[in-house]
Image (tube, rainbow, N blue to C red):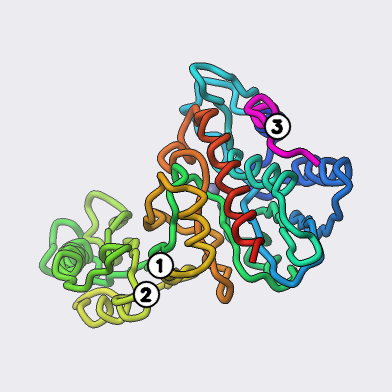
Amino acid sequence: MVNEFSQPELIDALCALTRIKRVSGGEHECVEWFKREFTKHGLPVKHSGRNLLTWRGRGKKVLLLNTHTDTVPANKSWTLDPWNPVRKDGRVYGLGANDAGGCLVGMFHALLSAKFDEDKFTLMFAPTCDEEIAGEGFEKFVHEIPPFDACVTGEPTNCEIGIAERGMFKLDMLTTGKSAHGSRPWQGVNSIYLAARDILTIEQLHENFPERDDVLGRTSLAVTIMNGGSARNVIPGESRWVIDGRTIPQLDNETTIARIEAAMKHSRVEIKKARFGVWKRSPQDEVIKCACAAAPDSKIVAFQGVSDAWWNKTAQGLILGPGLSEQSHAADEWIEESQVVRGYRIYKGIAERFLSK
Ligand SMILES: [Zn+2]
């Protein structure tokens, strides 16, 4: 067994992975790559859809390392070839190098090299699909994985220790007025004026929420899309707009949506999507203490986004990974090579501590 992987070995693996197209829904080649790697190292493989699980050990106490294989599509602003990784200035450029290539490479090599008693403990690694879209990934596969005591979710956090993420909802709003000819506005009811009033009410609501969380901050609301009107000379009878909400335990999805509905004078919720609730763990949990010991320079933070950690409802958990969250989904995405090494060492350190007593 390898004791410790070197930077060149880790970066070679990251480049090999970055050459594989793995946009959500098209992770098949990446799945095959991991299957070959697992087999090459004599590891077992459980395969379901575009999800994989492998493990070492047969002990009762189990740690799961999970991150996603898929990437978003390359946006139009890319100046480099997204699938031809370039190494420059200590960085690796390529689509998914940061989100979540560094996590994939770090977790896989941690699985290969962590030292623990395989009769007493089990270390599992699950590269899963569809994180960037709702679908067939960890949210389904988690029910096919044997029980685990803790899960480390890999997302770029600059190796900080994420113990919470805000909930998220989206409301499609409809404001109804009455259409009329543009030359006789008094015969109609302008839905844009009505929507504008309700939209400013949303701004007021957002500004006046008193609830705060020590880690997650505040519940926030933002109107992010506004559509109304069909022609220059028609008083618009209908307007549609969208609210993006991010929530904390003290003011969760359900309560926030109820407050919005109560405050609306002219508009109603047409479609409600609230897939992700608030996720928060105690800094006293064993796995988080192991992470603090393995990464003494890392801070405990809230993850600024939503992740597959949400689907881990029962076990201990945290979100941690090499790379910067602002590089995720960015054109000419990159990750620092030194971050990849750091992430790998932290994953290995968490595993060796958690699987020692
Ligand atoms: Zn990600």
Residue picked out by circle 2: 253
**Could you tell me how far apart the alpha carbons at marks 1 and 2 are, in whole angstroms?**
7 Å
Q: Are marks 1 and 2 in contact (CB under 8 Å)?
A: yes
Residue depicted at x 70% and y 28%: 9
Locate the N terminus by quadrant: top right
Would you say residue 7 sits in the magenta stretch?
Answer: yes
Viewer-side residue, 220 vs 66: 66
Which one is earlier in the sequence, the residue at label 3 or at label 1? 3
Viewer-side residue, 275 vs 291: 291
> The residue under label 2 is which amino acid type?
Asn
Magenta residues? 1-13
Which one is earlier in the sequence, the residue at label 2 or at label 3? 3
Residue picked out by circle 3: 13
Helix, strand or loop under label 1: strand
Q: Which mark is residue 167?
A: 1
Count of numbered badges drawn on the protein: 3
Viewer-side residue, 143 vs 231: 143
Assess disc 2: are there few (<14), some (14-19) or many (≥20) residues with their C-alpha within 10 Å of its C-alpha: many
Assess disc 1: are there few (<14), some (14-19) or many (≥20) residues with their C-alpha within 10 Å of its C-alpha: many
**Beta carbon at label 2 within 8 Å of ligand 1:** no
